[in-house]
Image (cartoon, rainbow, N blue to C red):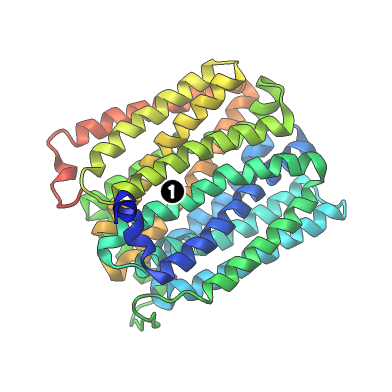
Amino acid sequence: MAGPEALGGISRAMSNVNFRRYWYGMSVITVCFWAYRTALGWLTWQLTEDPKWLGFVVFTEMVPMILLGPIAGAVVDKYGSLRVGRLAQMAWALSIALIAVATLGGIMTPVLLLVFSFGQGCVAGFSNPAHLALVAKVVPRDHISPAVALQSGSVQTGRFIGPAVTGPLLVAYSPGVVFALITAGFVYFVVILYLVRTIEPEERQESSQGIFADFKDGLSYAAGNLHLRTFILFSAVMGICLRSAPELMPAFAVDIFGRGESGLAWLLAGFGLGAVFSSLWLAVRGRATGLARVFAVNLCIGALALIAFGLTANFWIALALVAVAGFGTNTVSVAGQIIIQSVVAGHMRARVMGLMGTTFRAFPALGALFLGLGASVFGLTAPIITAAMLALAAWAYFLWLNRNGALRRRPGV
């Protein structure tokens, strides 16, 4: 009895068989995804040795996500999270397989990387809202908070394990071999998604209006709700200012710390390790109450840690700081998502999560573009510190916005 009780919200979420299946699949696919991001960053650096290209690649992926992500939420609400999620994962597997073939065949170029990034951005535009909405459809409503935290925990565990595994692989083998191994993981997740069932069967929603009208309804709904618009907006700002920092780690690993592939793996794993502890803490906590305050405190922590990271030249101190930054920034991200999942209406869920999903992937990519361009002109450290200081300004504004407890008035927040 004591064991499950000690796990708090984790035991409640894991009591749902379909969530367990989904979580097992997510645990594998996120290792593969972060291994892919690490290999992609290293391949980009090998081909160009220019921090601008690190930003260009992620920016090219961001553009279709911004254009498609929110509209894709309306598609997911219409056709179902599982159906869209399965198709999107199939497309991911095919895309990474083609990258492996092009890399192993010696025909990969920076321009071709941009083409693949654009295609993957189109796929991610649909997969993000599908998966963000799906987690709330495989658990009862009172299990949403720990389920969302555990979903993030699987993502962040992958963020830790993926780079840690990929570093040695990149030393021993070429990026093409790594991409080939990653493809198998994406195929595995497709199989898992065909075994998952939602609590209520998903049926196609017939509507007298088109997808764009459905999207406009979702946008109006989010803009008209204080909690939704506030946490979506701040998640976007944090995506630009804080969550974009890991994209420059290949350059930091080489130019600042002189540690190559292994240094890159350690730095990305440090971000991931901090985020893992953040997700586990939120999952054990298991409730939405008080999350507005948690959001504010960790927004400050994440910004201060990145400022300190930009000021140190000691690799081991930097490693500790990126772990703290990972904890703070992930707590901000997950707390905002839990709040949104707790207050959004079911028939609007995918549309709202499509907006939120854009802040997870697209805005860090936009931030990476700015950081990469800034690093080419001012060096690596100045853009990181400037972005973190902007995040501190946003933190002060959040405190002002919530000065009368407006964001805590709704029950559960």
SS at circle 1: helix
Q: Is residue 208 above or below residue 232?
A: below
Classify residue 95 as left or right of residue 395: right
Quadrant showing the N terminus: bottom left
Which residue bears the numbered disc 1? 359
Horizontal side of residue 251 vs 392, given as left or right:
right
Q: Residue 148: which quarter of the image?
A: bottom left
Relative image position of residue 255 (x, y in whole percent): 69, 22
Residue 197: where, in percent of width, then height?
Answer: 43, 76
Q: Position of residue 60 (x, y in %)?
A: 61, 49
Residue 250 visible (yes or no): no
In the drawing, does residue 399 fall left or right of residue 235? left
Residue 320 shows in the view: yes
Q: Please tell me which residue lies in front, 76 or 320.
A: 320
Instruction: Tell me which residue sits at (24%, 58%) in the image.
Output: 343
Q: Residue furthest front?
A: 1
Picture mark count: 1
Work out whether 173 lies above or below 394.
below
Hey, what amino acid is under mark 1? Thr
x, y percentage for residue 331? 37, 41
Category of crowding for the residue at label 1, using alpha-carbon neighbours closer than 10 angstroms: few (below 14), some (14–19), many (at least 20): many
Asked where in the image residue 71 lies, by quadrant, the reply is: bottom left
Residue drawn at x 62%, y 33% is 266
Q: Is residue 357 left or right of residue 219?
A: right
The answer to which of 123 and 284 lies nearer the viewer is: 284
Residue at x 51% of width, y 29% of height: 322
Relative depth, front residue between 27 and 251? 27
Q: Nearer the viewer, residue 409 or 62?
A: 409
Residue shown at the point (69%, 63%) measured from the top left: 184
